[in-house]
């Protein structure tokens, strides 16, 4: 009797079925996220206790806006190694984006307990306290973050926002000017400076700050154009203000302020009926507008950066500074 030979073709095993961390990282850096995720998920399937695979899979899920799935991976990372801060920070970022600020703050505070010099945890906590209108706590945490890294411009901007909320415009301006010394072409900082000058009723200074923004960003966002228009109105440069406001779509999310500024122009021109109509429209829109609760906890970080090494980029400049200082004293 002849030996039976099955005609069913043998299934070839994919050599990468177990996953490869190095290959997954390379695919991630190439932005081939689906392929990278397949590698990391294969690792997790074979080794559920792989912390690097969970963190990497979570990062990709976050980029794919699959926040709950990403959170599952980061929480697994915390269970696997509760002494590492990376998973706490990433989980906090997701909670903040979902608007769950209390949970985000809890994870950040855990990160601070584990790593008392965590710049990102302090800056992130500050942003949450700012959202919760706990301004003194926000100032405290931003100040610590800046003590650890004085060149963190986003933290200076947020610290300025906290000072604005408590009416300390002098300190807010000081922080923003310090930020501009670090990044002289930062349009966001100039826009924030314009806002403070408007609050201080220093309209010429506000106009000049917004002009800097327009120079850096010719296609400036509507909020900048509104601020610029407001400074022009206050200086009675009404034609220029009209031209600026005309560039902003009526359906813009800042519609209430847009109509309010049109009302201000008409009021200065003595067109009180038209001004009243604009003010009524502004009031109606403002009553319907709601602030979005979710936000990015760490706007200064790209998702492909190593969070634990956030201060490394400043080390060389510090080494150079110390070397120069040493040389000058010899």
Image (cartoon, rainbow, N blue to C red):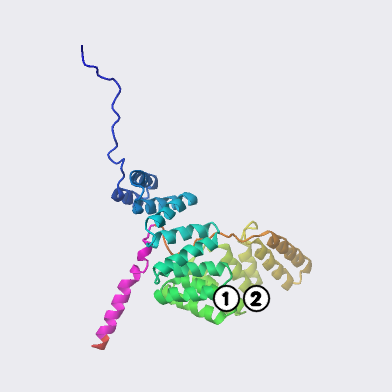
Q: In which quarter of the image is residue 244?
A: bottom right
Q: Do the residues labelled 1 and 2 touch (CB within 8 Å)?
A: no
Residue drawn at x 28%, y 32% is 12
Disc assigned to residue 20: none
Q: Residue furthest top?
A: 1
- What quarter of the picture does the C terminus occupy? bottom left
Q: Position of residue 108 (x, y in %)?
A: 46, 65
How many neighbours does mark 1 have within 10 angstroms: few (below 14), some (14-19), or many (20 or more)? some
Quadrant in the picture for residue 102:
bottom right
285 relative to 129, above or below: above
Image position of 234 (left or right of 313): right
Q: Is residue 206 visible?
A: no
Say the numbered circle drawn on residue 164: 1
Q: Where is residue 206 in the image (x, y as percent from the top left)?
A: 57, 76
- CA gap, disc 1 to disc 2? 20 Å
The quadrant holding residue 279 is: bottom right
| Dominant SS in magenta | helix
Residue under numbered circle 2: 234
Circle 1 SS class: helix
């Amino acid at each position: 009797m002849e030996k039976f030979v099955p005609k069913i073709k043998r299934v070839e095993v994919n050599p990468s079925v177990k996953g490869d961390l190095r290959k997954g990282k390379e695919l991630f850096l190439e932005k081939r996220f689906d392929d990278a995720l397949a590698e990391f998920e294969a690792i997790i399937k074979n080794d559920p206790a792989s912390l690097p695979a969970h963190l990497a899979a979570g990062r990709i899920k976050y980029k794919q806006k699959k926040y709950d799935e990403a959170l599952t991976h980061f929480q697994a990372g915390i269970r696997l190694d509760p002494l590492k801060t990376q998973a706490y920070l990433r989980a906090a970022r997701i909670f903040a984006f979902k608007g769950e600020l209390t949970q985000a703050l809890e994870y950040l505070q855990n990160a601070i307990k584990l790593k008392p010099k965590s710049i990102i945890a302090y800056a992130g906590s500050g942003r949450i306290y700012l959202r919760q209108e706990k301004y003194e706590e926000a100032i405290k945490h931003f100040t610590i973050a800046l003590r650890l890294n004085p060149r963190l411009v986003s933290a200076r901007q947020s610290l300025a926002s906290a000072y604005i909320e408590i009416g300390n415009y002098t300190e807010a301006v000081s922080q923003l000017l310090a930020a501009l010394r670090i990044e002289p072409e930062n349009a966001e900082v100039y826009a924030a400076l314009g806002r403070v000058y408007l609050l201080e009723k220093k309209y010429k200074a506000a106009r000049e700050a917004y002009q800097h923004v327009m120079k850096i960003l010719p296609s400036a966002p509507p909020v900048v154009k509104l601020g610029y228009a407001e400074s022009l109105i206050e200086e009675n440069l009404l034609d220029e203000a009209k031209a600026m406001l005309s560039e902003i779509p009526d359906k813009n999310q800042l519609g209430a302020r847009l109509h309010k500024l049109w009302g201000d122009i008409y009021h200065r021109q003595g067109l009180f009926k038209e001004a009243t109509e604009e003010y009524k429209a502004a009031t109606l829109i403002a009553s319907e507008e709601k602030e979005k609760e979710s936000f990015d906890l760490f706007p200064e970080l790209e998702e492909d950066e190593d969070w634990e090494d956030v201060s490394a980029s400043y080390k060389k400049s510090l080494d150079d500074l110390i070397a120069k200082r040493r040389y000058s004293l010899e």
